[in-house]
Image: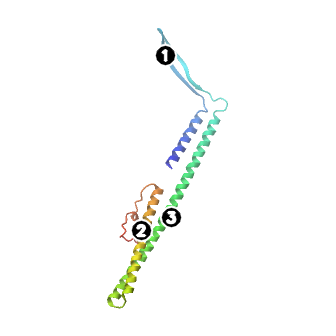
Amino acid sequence: MLASLADYAAAESALQLEVAKQYPDIHLGPGYTYDTGTHKIAFGLAGITLPIFDRNQGGIREAEAKRKEAAARTAAVQDTLLGDLDHALAHYQASLQALRLSDAHLAHARKQLEARHAAFSAGDADRLTYTQALADYQVSELSRLDALIAVQRSVGALEDALQQPLAHAAASRSPNEAMPP
C-alpha cells in the first residue's frame, strides 16, 4: 500500500510540474568574462521555454492520465487489503467463538468425569462408564487445543493483514489457561 501511495504521489508531482510548464519560463543570468585584458559584463538569456500555442496541454493530459492510473492502482490495492483484513477478522472471530464453545464442552466433560468418578468410587457405576467419561474428557481437551491452535493461526493471519502485531490477550494465552465465556 505504501508503494502504491508513493507512486500516486510521484504521479501527482509530475502533474504539478506539467501544469507549471504551461507558463513561460525565462532564466536570466548575469555573466562576467575576462577576455585578453578586457573585462566584459553581459546579461544573457540562460534558457527560455515558451509554450505559446498549446500551453503544454498534451503533457498535462498525459500526466493526468498517469495520475488517474496510479489512483486506480492504489484503490485496487486498498480494496484487496480491506478484503483480506475483513476475511482475517471474520476468521479470527469465528475461531474465538469455536474456542469458547470448546471451553464449554470441556467444562461439561469435566463435570461428567467428576460425577462418574464419584459414582465409580461409591460403587454406583462400573469401570467402563468411568473410562468412557475419561475418554470423553480427553477428547474435549484435544478439541480445545485444536481450537486454541486455530485462534493462534487466525491471530497470525490478522497480524499479517494488518502488518503489525496484535496486543490481544488471546494471542498470549498458554494452552492450559481457559478462555472466559
Residue 113 rendering spot, x and y as whole percentages: 37, 82
Q: Distance between the residues labelled 2 and 3?
A: 16 Å
Whether residue 112 is visible: no
Residue in front for this viewpoint, 154 or 14: 154
Asked if residue 127 is positioned above or below residue 88 in the image, the reply reads below
| Residue ranking furthest to the top | 37
Task: Mark 3 vs mark 1: give the one in front.
Answer: 3
Answer left or right for 141 relative to 39: left
Residue 86, numbered label: none
In the shown orientation, is residue 53 left or right of residue 135? right
Q: In which quarter of the image is residue 165?
A: bottom left
Type of residue at label 2? Leu
User: How far apart in space, not on screen, are marks 2 and 1 (Cα)?
Assistant: 81 Å
Residue drawn where x is 58% and y is 34% of the image: 20
Q: Is residue 15 above or below residue 142?
A: above
- How many numbered callouts? 3
Q: Mark 2 points at which residue?
A: 148
| Residue depicted at x 55% and y 19% | 44
Could you say which quadrant of the image residue 45 lies in?
top right
Q: What residue type is labelled 1?
A: Tyr
Q: Is mark 3 on a helix, strand or loop?
A: helix
**Residue appearing at x 46%, y 70% in the figure:** 97
Query: Which numbered disc, 2 or 3, marks the residue that appears first in the sequence?
Result: 3
Q: Residue 133: horizontal and vertical position, in percent?
A: 39, 82
How many neighbours does mark 3 have within 10 angstroms: few (below 14), some (14-19), or many (20 or more)?
Answer: some
Disc 1 marks which residue?
A: 32
Compared to residue 78, the image places residue 146 above or below, namely: below
Which image quadrant: the C terminus? bottom left
The disc, 3 or 1, on the residue closer to the chain's N-terminal end is 1
Question: Marks 3/1: CA distance?
Answer: 73 Å
Which residue carries the number 3 mark? 90
